[in-house]
Amino acid sequence: MSASSPATAPSTSTENPEPFRVNLNVVLTCPECKIYPPDIVERFSDGDLICGNCGLVLGDKIVDTRSEWRTFANDDQGGDDPSRVGDAANPLLNGSQLDTTISLGQPGSSLGRDLGRIQSKSVNDKKDLALVSAFTKISSMSEAYQLPKVVQDAAKEIYKIVADDRQLKGKSQESIMAAAIFLACRLSGVERTFKEIWYLTNVPKKKIYKVVHIIETILKKDGGRLASTMAGSEANRSGVVQTTNAGNLIGRYCSHLGLSSTITNAAEYIVDRVKEEGTLAGRSPISIAAAAIYMASALFGNAVSASAIADISGVSDGTIKTAYRFLAEAKDSLIDPAWKTSNKVDMDALPKA
């Protein structure tokens, strides 16, 4: 008996299957006309795919994939408004803000306008209308001083929190706005002084100062709502509105004076040393910043007069020279020793106290 040969196992291909590719050579043609190139027309109104030559229906229930730009906003004006939704909800206002808008109606008729006015009065909240008016004023004042949007949003949030508080009863709306902008600048790290806010809002400094202290007490009680707006702010994370820092004013003052970054950094170093040594304890941050710039500019050979610094900072040149007198007496402890060894500064160029 002959031995049977073992059965051959089926060969299994280990090769990966070829990936799917669209065959671009496949062309849809009309089976009746058979013309090339084919004349295929999509009729979106009927949902059909037809031959443009003989009219044979090649497909039906075709889905229209074009954008649905349709609106009734400007039908009476013959305009084109491709908006599909309304305005985004404003988180600074109350309610859901799902309002109904009535169009103007037929040309020459005031019916639509009258209905819209009546509907607006019945739906819009008076508090929201007052907030919108206040927010508009805050935005215009902030833009006049070129304050960033984060400051505007923070000022609006502060105003919304404190506007109806009993502690501010009797205070003018302008003073509350001015205080809100001032505190928003501090929270955002964009330092502005009371005098600058006074120039911006025409509210006296004393009024701003009083309202700021009242708002600070209110914000300490309701800091959670402000935290959502000022997320990431060092001042807000600590829960305390920080006081104005002289070092934060130097960069802006030096920029207005056209001074170099070397003088700016030197002035900031002097301010830090002044704070550690307590040389100008009790003086305003504006005076300290101005005196530091006056000293640093003279050290690095680009001396700026006290009157020029006074025009930028808003303090008198006599105040700057008085503060500089204390800096000159303590110059050995305020000046970086590396400046002397590298011959970057000229100690003899310092103005005489």
Image (cartoon, rainbow, N blue to C red):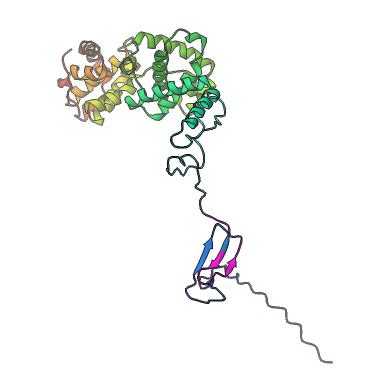
Quarter occupied by the C terminus: top left
**Is residue 225 shown to the viewer in this render?**
yes
Q: Position of residue 2 (x, y in %)?
A: 81, 91
Q: Position of residue 327 (x, y in %)?
A: 25, 15
Nearest the camera: 333 or 260? 260
Lateral position of residue 159 relative to residue 64, left or right: left
Lateral position of residue 102 relative to residue 261, left or right: right
Q: Position of residue 267 (x, y in %)?
A: 27, 23
Quarter occupied by the N terminus: bottom right
Q: Which residue range is magenta in the image?
A: 49-67
- Quadrant position of residue 79: top left
- Quadrant position of residue 56: bottom right
Can you name the residue that lies furthest to the bottom here? 1
Can you name the residue that lies furthest to the right here? 1
Q: Is residue 56 magenta?
A: yes
Nearest the camera: 322 or 103? 103
Count of marks, rendered view: 0
**Is residue 155 shown to the viewer in this render?**
no
Nearest the camera: 210 or 68? 68
